[in-house]
Amino acid sequence: MLSYRDCNTLYVSPTGRGDGKYYDGDRPLGSLHRALELVDMMRGGGMLQPITIKLRAGEYCLSAPLVFRPTMSNISFEPFGDGNVLISGGRKITGFAETSFMGTACLGAYIEDVKTGAWKFTDLYVNGLRAEKTRLPATGYFRMKETENPTTTLFGPSRWFTAEDGDLAQFSSLYAFEDTIVSFNHYWIDEHTPVESLDTATGRVTMTYRTRFNIRPGQEYILENVAEQFQNPGEWYLDRANGMLYYIPRDESETPETLDVWAPVAAKLIEITGGKEDDDHVTGVRFSGITFAYTRGDYGSGQNVDGSAGEMFASDAQAVSNAHGAIEVSYARNVSFTDCTLRNFGVHGFNVKDGCRAVRVERCRIFDGGAGGVRITGGAYGSPEYTRTRGCTVSDCRITHLGRRYFAACGVLLMHALECDILYNEIGDLYYTGVSVGWTWGYAKTVCRDNRIIGNHIYDLGKGFLSDMGGVYLLGSQPGTVVSHNRIHDIKCKEYGGWALYTDEGSAGMTLEYNLCYRTTSNSYHQHYGSSNVVRNNIFADSDEPLLRVSRDEPHLSMMFYNNILYATGTAILAKYGSGAPLEEGAIVSMRNLMWHRGGEGVVYSTQEGLETLEKAQAVGMEEESIIADPLFADPENGDYTLSDGSPAFALGFRAFDATKCGPRG
């Protein structure tokens, strides 16, 4: 039993076997789960004082998450002394020796639990880096010959396809074909499903999960986890039948003696789950200076399009939006993760769910995730008030190298939440959107409002894998939401839609200002359709398509577009305007903008007949007081769009901003 002197601080060590004391005998606890049990006991005894749990350096391996109930509030977790604290959902694998597999020299380790079927894992991390799965073909793609449901309807799923004759001969001879994964990218999602069976007579490949979207003949796909393709440095293969793990070293420095190999056991590390009433919330849980790593990346989408439970699909409909996280918080407030590292995780990193308030992720390093970095969501419009999530913050974090298993993931995904701040983060090296906010299609009622996306550096997105993405993607009505002072660049789509700023279906009531957007494969700014959005004082530059696009115009004020700088390189300023309300009816108010073409060539205002020049646009009421003039950037060829003091933009009312200050502060 702890004395009153032990009530404020508990100590934990990976090698501890004591009662949590240090001051009188160096007897730390040996388990984080045991520490939480003691806190629960103390709270049950009426001890309500703040409690700090100090962790000795080392590895704390969890096979199940740490679960916080309402009684476990007002607790801080922090390192004790020097050294790194790692909370791991993995199991360290040792016993490697030199061997060969499929004719390739490698390192191998026997794992009894794999041999008996007690353990199967689909992720591997070696010396802090994600090891790579094999793929077939090594480059390029196979193409489907026939599909179950070759419809053009988007939500037209299939359970099977047939392989081309030449591919079938190869598939039928593969070792452990049942362990392969079928993967393909289309539209704005990527789909992954284990193989259920192969019919060598018909060439039919039956997938374990049904596809989310339609697949038609000619669809590209690959097979992953193919034993015969085990040949490149950094690749791994789990031979389940023989209980052997094989790995090809990246270089000569990786030997049996130097390998630090982890395979995940747990899907989650932390679950903070309170009750629905305010008095039952978990409150005041704080983690600082701790590293979290190694969670399972297995995920099949088990929801129908309408959100109800259903059969398993090979993908969510967008942004891996229903997936879990390594750290999950619900019905909680005043929870924080500060100066922590979350790496080598399977699906999402942080997952803030229903009923949360003032959950903060600050100055954290989030990288090498199977899906996205931070997901924040609450109850949608019409749900009970207690489900609403509000006032959460992601600030000064470095969120990079994500989507390593599920390409469609976002750096930060904010759905059905209000009054949240996404501030001064670095978000880059992803295959899809940087920051996604909203999640109500069209002009339907929503709880999403008054969110701020400010000061972020967002870059290197898409990489040519998916379509229909944005540096900042906004969906649905969001009154009071502000997107400001962000630097967004280098976005590359597969077929269409690599945009810097993207206001999608029904976006309304938002302000987008003081953003620097450049080097995109599609428009710098695209509004699908929306209402009453203010787009002002931005720099849009050097996109591969016209800088501005409005895909659907409607008989109302869609956008107020003014005091922007539009700097084209071989493109028009405005793409072909949508059909609907004529421009002269004022669906867009566009004025006092500065336009220029790199190199001084003549500016083409629009690709639409009748709007080819600025003069023609002004004749129908567009671009009042707008001019064509060189903005006098410092070095635009190298991404420096700083304005000189003599820039003509200032006479139009443009206000300078320093884009070099985007990203983490300090």
Image: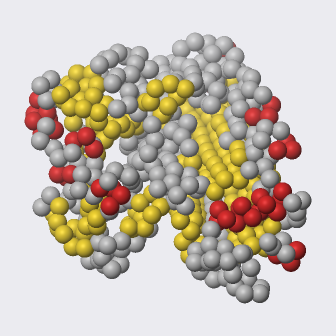
Residue 493: image x %, image y %? Answer: 42, 40
Residue 20: image x %, image y %? Answer: 72, 75
Which residue is nearer to you in this view: 168 or 640?
168
Check the picture and name the quadrant holding the N terminus.
bottom right
Q: Can residue 74 be seen in this view?
A: no
Residue 21: image x %, image y %? Answer: 74, 79
Quadrant of the rendered image containing residue 12: bottom right
Which residue is nearer to you in this view: 78 or 396?
78
Image side of residue 223 versus residue 25, left or right: left
Residue 608: image x %, image y %? Answer: 48, 22
Image side of residue 134 versus residue 457, left or right: left
Q: How is the image coloured?
A: secondary structure
* Residue found at x 62% / y 77%: 16
For this orientation, the residue located farthest to the front is: 1
* Residue found at x 23% / y 61%: 232
Q: Is residue 157 visible?
A: yes
**Number of numbered labels in the structure image:** 0
Q: In this view, does 174 lie above or below 202?
A: below
Which residue is nearer to you in this view: 487 or 157?
157
Q: Is residue 584 above or below residue 594?
A: above
Image side of residue 142 versus residue 336, left or right: left
Q: Is residue 93 above or below residue 324?
A: below
* Residue found at x 38% / y 42%: 465
* Residue found at x 67% / y 39%: 377
Which residue is nearer to you in this view: 632 or 639?
639
Check the picture and name the quadrant holding the C terminus.
bottom right
